[in-house]
Amino acid sequence: MSKMSNFYVGIIEMVEQGHDYDAIEQMMVDEGYPREACLPIINQIAGDIDELERINEIAAEAYYHGA
C-alpha cells in the first residue's frame, strides 16, 4: 500500500475509534493539508461510517427476520 493510502487508512481508523477531531486535523495539517480542508474531510468520513453502520444494521435485521 502506498504511503498516501496508509495515511488515509490511518485517518479513517482514527475517526472510527473516536479520536479527537482536533488531533486528527493537526495530523492532516502536519502532512500538508490546508487546515480549512481538514474538518470537511473528517466530517465526510464520519458521515460515511455512520451510513455504513446504518446499512449493516438494516441488513442484519432483514437477515434475522428472514427477508
Image (cartoon, rainbow, N blue to C red):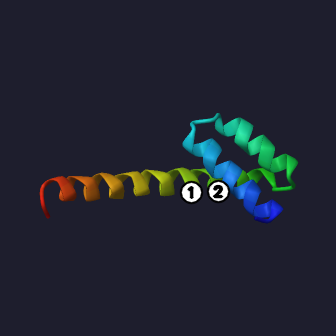
Q: What residue sits 39% from the left and 51% below the top?
A: 53
Relative placement, left or right, of 24 versus 51 is: right
- Give x and y (percent) for residue 12: 62, 51
Q: What residue sits 62% from the left and 46% below the top?
A: 13
In this rendering, the answer to whether 2 lies above or below 16 is below
The quarter of the image holding the N terminus is bottom right
The quarter of the image holding the C terminus is bottom left
Q: What residue sits 57% from the left and 38% below the top?
A: 17
- Give x and y (percent) for residue 47: 49, 54
Do callouts 2 and 1 mark residues in contact (Cβ within 8 Å)? yes
For the residues labelled 2 and 1, the Cα–Cα distance comes to 5 Å
Question: Toward which corner of the image does residue 19 lie, by quadrant?
Answer: top right
Task: Give amino acid for label 1.
Answer: Gln
Q: Which residue is mark 1?
A: 44
Relative placement, left or right, of 66 versus 43 is: left
Residue placed most toward the observer, 59 or 37? 59
- Give x and y (percent) for residue 49: 49, 53
In this rendering, the answer to whether 19 lies above or below 13 is above
Which mark, by number, is residue 34? none
Relative placement, left or right, of 54 versus 44 is: left
Circle 1 residues within 10 Å: few <14, some 14–19, many ≥20? few
Q: Which residue is mark 2?
A: 41
Residue at the left extreme of this rendering: 66
Task: Give amino acid for label 2.
Answer: Ile
**In what element is the residue under mark 1?**
helix
Circle 2 residues within 10 Å: few <14, some 14–19, many ≥20? some
- Give x and y (percent) for residue 5: 74, 62
Q: What residue sits 63% from the left and 55% below the top?
A: 40
Residue placed most toward the observer, 13 or 40? 13
**In what element is the residue under mark 2?**
helix
In this rendering, the answer to whether 30 lies above or below 66 is above
